[in-house]
Image: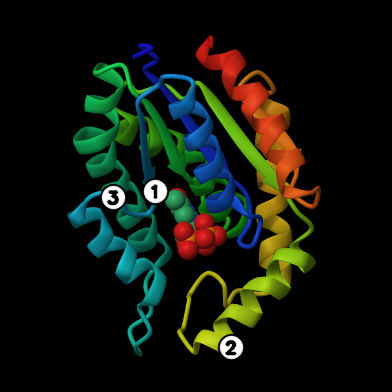
């Protein structure tokens, strides 16, 4: 087994094909001899999955306050980092995480308008010293991802708080992700999510191989 010990995160809007690309990269890295752990946020541990359920589907008269939402994301992250991510990295595994700290900056910061410095501080607290080696940002015009997500809400008849946000909200999320990519060009690599799946997977694999050193 190759000792890799790197955290790779995937970010992007709903409907950008993140989960498919995570599966493909996991297969590629396993094939190259790395031990791979796949996790997601919100979620990743039984406790954090409880928070996910609230964050995604809470739908009663009592609205979730933006600060409450933020704390739930960060609480789940702290749990996932300390229970899953840190131990896996220490054991030399590669961790692929579906969404992570950049989602907080894009959604709670750029889209919901919460203070970016405060969010960075909370992210740092949840990270507990863990560093992200590479972030794959799958970029997609909100109209495309939004239409896919809206169809899903209709056909599955399941309420999803974030997917029910307006198109303007999702434009802000995208601007947030692109601003982050401009701020951290070494870590965050932007990929056009509209290109053919295999072509995208090959480009992601090249970037990951470089970072992991295989
Ligand atoms: P999910 O179904 O995982 O979205 P997707 O399939 O698009 O990845 O739902 C997670 C939702 O939570 C998504 O709308 C993004 C949002 N989110 C935040 O607002 N802040 C965060 O810190 C994280 C991790 C996710």
Q: What element carries label 1?
A: strand
Q: Find residue 33 and report its horizontal and vertical position in percent.
A: 42, 19
Residues packed near mark 1 inside 10 Å, few (<14), some (14 to 19) or many (20 plus): some
Spatial distance from mark 1 to mark 2, Cα to Cα?
24 Å
Which residue position is annotated with label 1? 40
| Residue 136 visible within the image | yes
Q: From what the image shows, is residue 34 above or below residue 155?
A: above
Q: Which of 46 and 178 is in front in this view?
A: 46
Q: Find residue 29 and report its horizontal and vertical position in percent.
A: 49, 27
Of the image marks 3 and 2, the number of the one nearer the N terminus = 3
Q: Is mark 2 on a helix, strand or loop?
A: helix
Task: Note whether ligand 1 is within 8 Å of mark 1.
Answer: yes
| Residue 115 visible within the image | no
Query: In terms of image quadrants, where is residue 191?
Result: top right
Which residue position is annotated with label 3? 76
Which residue position is annotated with label 2? 154
């Amino acid at each position: 087994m190759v000792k890799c010990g790197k955290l790779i995160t995937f970010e992007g809007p709903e409907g950008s094909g993140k989960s498919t690309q995570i599966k493909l990269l996991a297969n590629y890295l396993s094939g190259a001899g790395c031990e791979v752990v796949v996790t997601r946020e919100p979620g990743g541990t039984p406790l954090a999955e409880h928070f996910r359920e609230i964050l995604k589907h809470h739908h009663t008269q009592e609205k979730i306050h933006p600060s409450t939402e933020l704390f739930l994301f960060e609480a789940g992250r702290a749990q996932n980092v300390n229970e899953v991510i840190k131990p896996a990295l220490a054991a030399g595994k590669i961790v692929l995480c579906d969404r992570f700290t950049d989602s907080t900056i894009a959604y709670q910061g750029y889209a919901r308008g919460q203070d970016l410095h405060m969010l960075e501080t909370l992210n740092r607290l949840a990270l507990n010293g863990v560093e992200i080696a590479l972030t794959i940002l799958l970029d997609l015009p909100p109209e495309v991802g939004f239409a896919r997500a809206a169809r899903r809400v209709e056909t599955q008849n399941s309420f999803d708080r974030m997917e029910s946000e307006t198109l303007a909200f999702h434009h802000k999320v995208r601007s947030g992700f692109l601003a982050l990519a401009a701020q951290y060009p070494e870590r965050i690599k932007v990929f056009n999510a509209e290109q053919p799946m295999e072509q995208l997977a090959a480009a992601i694999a090249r970037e990951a191989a470089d970072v992991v050193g295989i």
